[in-house]
Each structure stands twice: as C-alpha cells, then as structure tokens.
Image: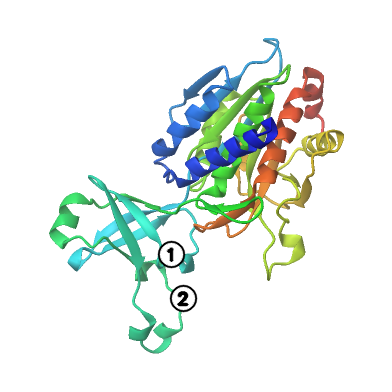
C-alpha cells in the first residue's frame, strides 16, 4: 500500500470514528476524546479551554512569528427531552436546526442514567384525520419510543436528557461517504489532514488548530477561542451545500472538485485571494462561492472578535446537510487539508502585516 493510499485510509478511518461518536452541542465530551488522540502525534501542545474547545498548537520558527487560527466545530445537532408522556413516550425539542421532516423513523441514543436506545415515532398517516393527513409533522407531533415501561422511563431518564442520532458511517461508491455529523466533523478531519501535512513542512507561523464547541447553537466556541488566542488571522473550516437534483447550479458546489473558497463581506479579500493563489501554485483543485452577508459559520465570530480579525472560510461540499446521511467526497477533505497547510507554510510576518489594509 502506498503512503498516499495509507494516509487517505487513515483520514477515512478518523472521519468514521468521529462521525459515529456522539457530541451534541454543549455536550461534546464523547467526541473530544478521539479527536484529541488523533491530533496529538502531529502537534506540540494540546489543551482545552474553559468552554471545552480543543486547541492544538503547532510551534513556528520564531517567537515573533504570526499566529494563525484554523477552526472547525466538533458539535452536532441533537435533541433534548422536554416531557415524559403516559406509557413512557418522550417529547423533545431540537438542539440546533433540524428539518423535522427527516426525524420520523430515526434511531437515537438517550443519555439518561444509562444510555438507552430509542426510535422517533409519529402518528401513522392511516390514523390522521382531515388536514392533519396532508401536513408535514411539527416537532411537537413527534415522540421517542424506548420500549421501556413508564415507571422505568420516569426513574431513569430526566427532563433535559440529551438525545443523539444514531447512524453508522456508510461507504458509498468511489470516494463518496455518508453519515451523521459530517457538519462539521468533516471540517475537523480536514484540520487533521492539515496537521499531518504540516508535520512534514517548515513553517514560520505559529498554528493553532481548534475544534470548537456549540457552533450549532450560536458559534459560541469560536467566540471564546478567538478571544483567548488573539490570532493575526483566522480561517474557519465548515461545510456548504453540495450538488443535488432540484437545486439551482449557483446555490450548490459539486462534490470532488475541491474545497470551496468563499468571498464576501465576512471574508478578508486578501485571504481569499491568497488561498486561491496557493491552490493554483500547488495544483490543488478548489471552487469559489460568494456569501453576501454573515456566513453562518465560525467565520462570523472570528471576524468580529477583539478589534477585528482578518478571516477566511474554506468549505467542504456536503449533500443532505443536517440529516443523518450527509454525503461528501474524501478527495475534497484531502485537498482542503493540503491547501490549508501550504497556506500556513507561506504565511510570514510581512504577509500578515499587509492584511490591515483592505
């Protein structure tokens, strides 16, 4: 097996492990462990801040070298128990933005006094009446069935218990893979690839690779970590909509054509230009996108931290966002990691000082 093939397989195995792990927004501890172990051999220091962000430090050549922050969020959307019905059925609300139409029939894990399996149910269409028969379900219409007696549910599962979707990693044909929480564990895997690439490079800059928390409920981890690190520039790594039937061509990005570099008011123009130049110089395919307002990613928090941080956004094309069968192309992760590493290796003090001028 060639080194490149072995490395791509290691990248896939890492994505599989962290995709199948649970780490709902605000409760990321279970996924933080495997992320920390995977990064440890490629970085000089590892720590967690007070909010739970994982910060991996790759030392640069000089103390006066610029400080770069690359981040991707490790949390996933999930559910939280709000009420116990008669017979032990659980009512719930969302932690993050679900399309409720995708929830019926999903398998879940409920974090009570133990971890319990459950399925999300709704009133079958055969039993609905009138307008109710045609309407899409609302979250208030859904419930979780554990199969446990009511008295056991009330004793073992508290109001406020966190619920995570359960889904195994799915190998599709060619380089495509599907699973849950690729938003944004795919970004974390891209950062891992970047760390792997940087371990073979000389770089002047100090590089901080951050797996942030609570992005899905208000980009909180990025706010805290940016404020604490005070980087000279930041790059958020997230996902964007991949090409699917019925979507307008200008609204999506094809899978397998490389990571997506965003331009717009949330993005420092020279950083976007530099990322594109690096891609061209090293023959790394990339795509472009425009975001006319806030990007809805960690980039939004980075840009407005302290007295303003030059910010860029690199995205992985992803189909079926915020479902349990999100799909991507592994080559986009590999290429994105290489692009970010070469960008870091070329970021010296003179480049960073020039960013103050728009």
| Above or below for 15 versus 88 | above
Determine the residue positioned at 34% across, 62% down.
119
Give how far apart the Cα atoms at labels 2 and 1 are: 11 Å
Q: SS at mark 2?
A: loop
How many C-alpha atoms fall within 10 Å of the one at disc 2: few (<14), some, or many (≥20)? few
Query: Residue 51 location, x and y as percent?
Result: 44, 32
The vertical placement of 214 against 179, above or below, is above
> Which residue is depicted at the point 67% across and 10% down?
63
The x and y percentages for residue 6 are 63, 34
Residue at mark 1 = 103
The picture places residue 194, in percent across and down from the top left corner, at 66, 31
Nearest to N terminus: mark 2 or mark 1: 1
Q: Residue at x 64, y 25 (%)?
A: 231
Image location of residue 284, percent across then percent down:
79, 39
The secondary structure type at the circle numbered 1 is loop
Q: Which residue is mark 2?
A: 136
Residue 304 is at least partly visible in this image: no
């Amino acid at each position: 097996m060639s080194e490149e093939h072995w490395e791509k397989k290691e990248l896939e195995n890492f994505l599989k492990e962290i995709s199948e792990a649970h780490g709902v927004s605000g409760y990321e501890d279970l996924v933080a462990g495997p992320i920390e172990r995977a990064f440890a051999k490629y970085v000089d220091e590892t720590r967690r801040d007070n909010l739970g962000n994982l910060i991996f430090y790759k030392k640069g050549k000089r103390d006066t070298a610029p400080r770069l922050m690359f981040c991707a969020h490790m949390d996933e959307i999930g559910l939280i128990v709000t009420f116990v019905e008669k017979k032990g059925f659980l009512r719930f609300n969302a932690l993050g933005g679900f399309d409720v139409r995708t929830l019926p029939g999903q398998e879940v894990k409920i974090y009570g006094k133990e971890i319990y399996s459950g399925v999300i149910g709704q009133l079958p269409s055969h039993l609905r009446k009138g307008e109710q028969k045609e309407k899409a379900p609302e979250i208030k219409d859904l419930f979780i069935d554990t199969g446990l007696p009511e008295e056991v549910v009330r004793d073992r599962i508290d109001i406020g218990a966190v619920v995570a979707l359960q889904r195994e990693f799915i190998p599709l044909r060619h380089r495509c893979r599907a699973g849950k929480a690729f938003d944004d564990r795919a970004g974390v895997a891209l950062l891992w690839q970047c760390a792997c690439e940087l371990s073979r490079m000389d770089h002047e800059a100090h590089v901080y690779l951050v797996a942030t928390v609570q992005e899905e409920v208000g980009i909180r981890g990025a706010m805290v970590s940016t404020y604490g690190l005070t980087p000279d520039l930041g790059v958020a790594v997230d996902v964007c909509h991949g090409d699917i039937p019925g979507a307008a061509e200008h609204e999506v990005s094809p899978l397998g054509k490389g990571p997506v570099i965003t331009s717009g008011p949330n993005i420092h123009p020279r950083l976007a230009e530099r990322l594109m130049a690096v891609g061209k110089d090293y023959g790394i395919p990339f795509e472009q996108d425009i975001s006319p307002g806030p990007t809805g990613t960690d980039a939004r928090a980075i840009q407005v931290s302290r007295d303003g941080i030059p910010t860029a956004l690199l995205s992985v094309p992803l189909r079926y966002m915020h479902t349990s069968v999100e799909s991507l192309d592994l080559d986009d992760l590999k290429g994105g990691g290489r692009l970010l590493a070469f960008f870091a290796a070329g970021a010296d003090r003179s480049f960073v000082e020039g960013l103050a001028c728009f």
